[in-house]
Image (cartoon, helix red, strand yellow):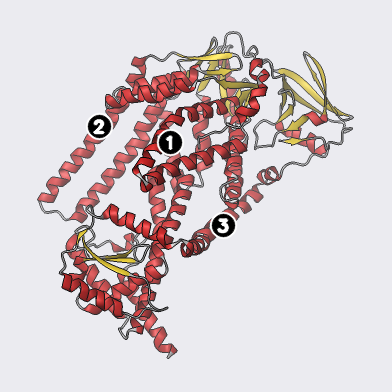
Amino acid sequence: MRSISTFRSDAPVEIRCRYYDGKTSRANQAVIRFREGFCILDFDGGSREIPLSELSVTEPLGGAGRMIRFSDGGYCEAARPGDLRHVLAAVGYREPVTSVIQKSGKRIAVLFLLLLGILAAGYFWALPFAAGIIAERIPRPVLSYISGKSVEALDGKWLFPSKLSEKKKSSLIRSFRKVRLPGGPQPIEVAFRSSELLGANAFALPDGTVLFMDRLVRIAKTRNELIAVYAHEAGHVVNRHSIRQIIQNSVVAALVAVYIGDVSSIVGAVSGWILESKYSRDFERMADRYAAEALLLNDISPLTLGRALETIEADHERLQGKGQEKELTDYISTHPPTGERIGELKAFMRERAARK
Amino acid sequence: MNQDQTPQASFVQKPDTYRFEFTGSGKEYFSIWIVNLLLSILTLGIYSAWAKVRTNRYLYRCVKLDDSGFDYHGSPIAILKGRIITVCLIAALNIAPQVHLALYLVVLVLFLVIMPWLVTRSLAFRMRNSSWRAIRFQFKGRVAEAAKCLYAYGLLSMITLFLAYPVQYREIKKFTFEKTYFGKTGFTFRASIGAVYKVFLLTGLFVLAIGVCYGIGMAGLMSGTDSGKSTEEIYLVIAPLMVILYLALILVVHPFFKTKITNLVWNNVELGEATFESTLTVRKYFKVIAGNLFLTILTLGIYWPWALVKIIRLRVENLSLTARNGLDNFMADSSAEVGAAGEEISSAFDFDISF
């Protein structure tokens, strides 16, 4: 709402309007004129002279009525909002920026494209970048706290104590300790659990704990396959992927809820899931690349990771029945398709070979 | 299109019946929405309070009764405050149980204690900032009454496994309408318990029917698993079944409930001696909802402003007010303005918790 004291007060203009005095709901037919710093209001019941400093005009919003408000609570509603705009323009009133933009279809179209650009830039670049910076600065105790809470929540429901022998476990931990990682030793702790639901799997927690499922240890064809999986999880730990994912997913979920939540919560949940799965796939690719570097450092072929992925996939298929429609689910899957990941590992090796 | 119909409609109308009109358009609202969205993103959400004020002003001013628009006067700062309070409350409720169970209980009790106060303040804020013909609405509900609606009747509906929920629903409506005033003129709400129950029971039957369909489908599948069908084949049957039942819920049950309850409520509301009439039909509501859902999904949400305008137009233009003595004689409550000394203090507690 703006004051109109900037009026050129001698402008020869008048507006037909309805006047409400703020005391009763009576609608008075009225005419407004401007003269010498005053607004003169003539209506069927009488006449008023109001100093311009006690007037304000409401912002134009599409074809909605516009009001000239008086400080005593009464106001005039222009019979045709268009009239008021012409009169105000004639007396030198400047409309607020938002209404100048809203009036023009072209400006709205430009703004719309700008909005899409900002959203795309935010989704593809700014949010992952910001989450990376924030994740670096989250203190270790917070990470341990989050990890502890998640394990606490999962233990007994999804995760159960490992059934592997102590000997097997300590032998594995010893092999993992020997693995040299890019950027020197990393604060990684390995632990074991069994889980029917998760099958052959391993995952990294924010504080650097890597959980291996018993079934993965059992089905792995060689020790090096397990080392490859360890190197992949180390990639998640080093780059703080889990905490970055928590940050990115919460922002996406919040925005989606605001944007689509009114339409349908299920549509919102599904689109949030599709948007978030891209981040997850990006993290997997980054961790694969890290693992490939790590494996080379230990004179193990990066393709060992590919073999480990194939072993894991074969096992999941054996348990769940063969999946045929893989293509469709690729778009919402949290991991890139195994074939593509192996292709990237091969590309990585060619790249390295060319460099030498 | 609408302008062609108006003369005919007014010819049929009784002279003392005033139809509510909605002059907004999807295109206009889209412009406002885009500007709001852009500024909200650029200010990391802070502008959203101003955005809400602009949206409300537009929508209120587009609602016309006897050629006069409604108006919204809420201050963005109060709305921003309300949003900060809401976010803090949600955060506290989520973080407290992680820290300590005792802390969670303290926060929960605190939350339950201030909830009725928040609700009444928020309703009062919204009413005080709504007007028609320069006369403000008012909400004079007391915190104790809100607590009674929320907790006493809430407990009743809980211990009866929500069989008594319609009773609570009616009490909440009665509380919100009968404590609301347009200037000096109060609203009354006369819907009978039986009528409210009828709407809820019919809706309940619909939901039950959908539940039974789901159960039968599931049972069929379970026997399918025994006969050795693969999980894939089962998912191929389950997925469409779930989609159809979900669509039935949002496209049939939702419009049914909304139509019946809206008509019931407004047809039993009076403002002084004036009476309201709502003439929604399930068919009209279904058409709007189905079109909106389809086009909003098809356009990835861009259609949303048009969708919102359509649903508001449907609800507004099916409402009319019959006042035998015309609409010129409502009086503003001058006492509300005389008490402006207290206004400064109370405006410090002004907020709107509705998103």
Q: Which amino acid does label 3 sit on?
A: Ile
Mark closer to the observer (2, 3): 3
For the residues tagged 2 and 1, is the chain the same? yes
Q: Of residues A230 and A77, which is closer to you in this image?
A: A230
Q: Earlier in the sequence, mark 2 or mark 1?
A: 2
For the residues tagged 1 and 3, is the chain the same? no
Determine which quarter of the picture holds residue B81: top right
Q: Of residues B323 and A182, which is closer to you in this image?
A: A182
Mark closer to the observer (1, 3): 3
* Residue matched to label 1: B289
Circle 3 packing at 10 Å, graded few (<14), some (14-19), many (20+), is some
Most distant residue in the left direction: B227
* Residue matched to label 3: A118
* Residue matched to label 2: B209
Question: Quick check: can you spot residue A137?
Answer: yes
Most distant residue in the bottom direction: A356
Task: Name the subunit of mark 2.
Answer: B
- Residue at disc 3, secondary structure: helix
Residue at 23%, 75% in the rendered image? A172
